[in-house]
Image (spheres, rainbow, N blue to C red):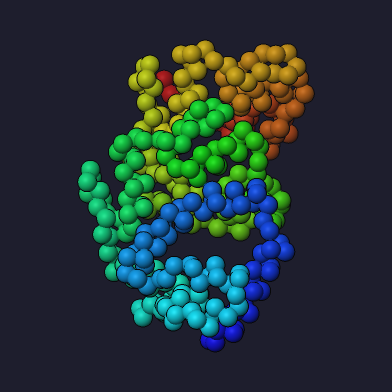
Amino acid sequence: MSAGIIYEESVSYVEENLMNPRSVKQEEIINDETLDFQENQKESENSELSHGTVQKNEYYSEFTNSVSCWSELPETHTTHIVRKTFQCPESEDCLRTNASLGKHRRFPIGEKMFACSECGECFSTKCKLGKHEKIHTAEKPFACSECEKCFKRKGDLTVHKRIHTGEKLFICPECEKCFRTKGQLTSHERIHTGEKLFICPECGKCFRIKGNLTRHEWIHTGEKPFVCSECEKCFKTKSELTVHERIHTGEKPFACSECEKCFKTKSELTVHERHHTGEKPFVCSECGKCFRRKCDLTVHERHHTGEKPFACS
C-alpha cells in the first residue's frame, strides 16, 4: 500500500471524527465498558515498545503540520498503521500487532505463563492474574459515592451506579425492553430465540443462564452454600437466605399501598393485594373455581383427583 493511499484513508478518518465527535457521556460509557480490553492491551503495548517494533507517534503528530512527512515514515511505522497485518499460521486469524499474534497463539496450545502465588492457578496475561489476585486479598478499591458499596473492578462500579441513576443503555431489538448491562440483554434475548446453552450433566435439563444451571446442580449435590449467621440454617440461594434473615431482624420492607400492611417478601404482598382487587388468577380446570393462591388451587384439585399425599406415621 502506498503512502498516498495511507494518507487519504487517515485524512478521511480524521475528518469523520472531527465532524462527528462523540459526546462526553458516550466516551465515558465506552471507556468503562471496555476497561478489561484496555487493560489487556497494556501488556501488548509494553512488549512492543521493549522490542522496538513500534516507533513513537511523533510522525503522526507531524502529520497535522506537514503532508510531506508521510513520505518520510519508516517501514515499521507504515506497517503498524495498516490494521491486522499479522496472520496466525494455525488459525489464519489476522491481528494488529506481532505481540498480539504472540498472545493469540498461546491460547490454542494452552500456554499460561502467569501463575498465582497463592493458589497456583495460571493465566494467559498478567492483567488477568492481577484481577484474580484480588480474590485472595479481598481488595475492593472502587467505592460507590451513593451507598459506599465497594468493588474489585472499575467496570463493576460503573454497572452498579446504574442502579442509582436508573440508566439502562442496552435495548432489546425485539421487544424494546431495556437493561443495565450487555450480559443481561444477552440473557434476555434467549427468551426470544429459545436458546438454552447451559446443560445439566446429571439430568440434561437446559438453562438460559449459567447461574440458573449452578443453582439447579445444587439439587443433585445437596449443596446449600448460604448460611444464616444467627441460626446457621443453610439455603441454596442468596435470596432465600435474605428472606429468612428477616425472621431474625423483623424487617418487612414491602408495604401495601391500600392499607399499609407490611410483608417480608414481594410475593406475600402480591397475594395480599388480591384481597383489595378481588383478583383470583388460579382457575380449576375441572370446575372453573378460582383462587388467589396457587397452593389453594393445588389443595382444591385433590377433591377431583382423590389424591391423599399425607399418610399417618
Q: Residue at x 63, y 20 (%)?
A: 254
Q: Residue at x 46, y 57 (%)?
A: 37
Residue 173 spot, x, y in % from top left = 69, 56
Foreground: 181 or 286? 181
Q: Residue furthest right?
A: 277
Foreground: 162 or 18? 18
Q: Is residue 53 left or right of residue 8?
A: left
Q: Residue at x 65, y 41 (%)?
A: 167
Query: Which of the 4 image quadrants contains residue 264?
Result: top right
Q: Is residue 21 left or right of residue 185?
A: right
Whether 206 is drawn above or below 101: the answer is above
Residue 290 spot, x, y in % from top left = 72, 29
Residue 170 spot, x, y in % from top left = 64, 50
Residue 304 spot, x, y in % from top left = 62, 32
Count numbered badges in the picture.
0
Q: Is residue 8 visible?
A: yes
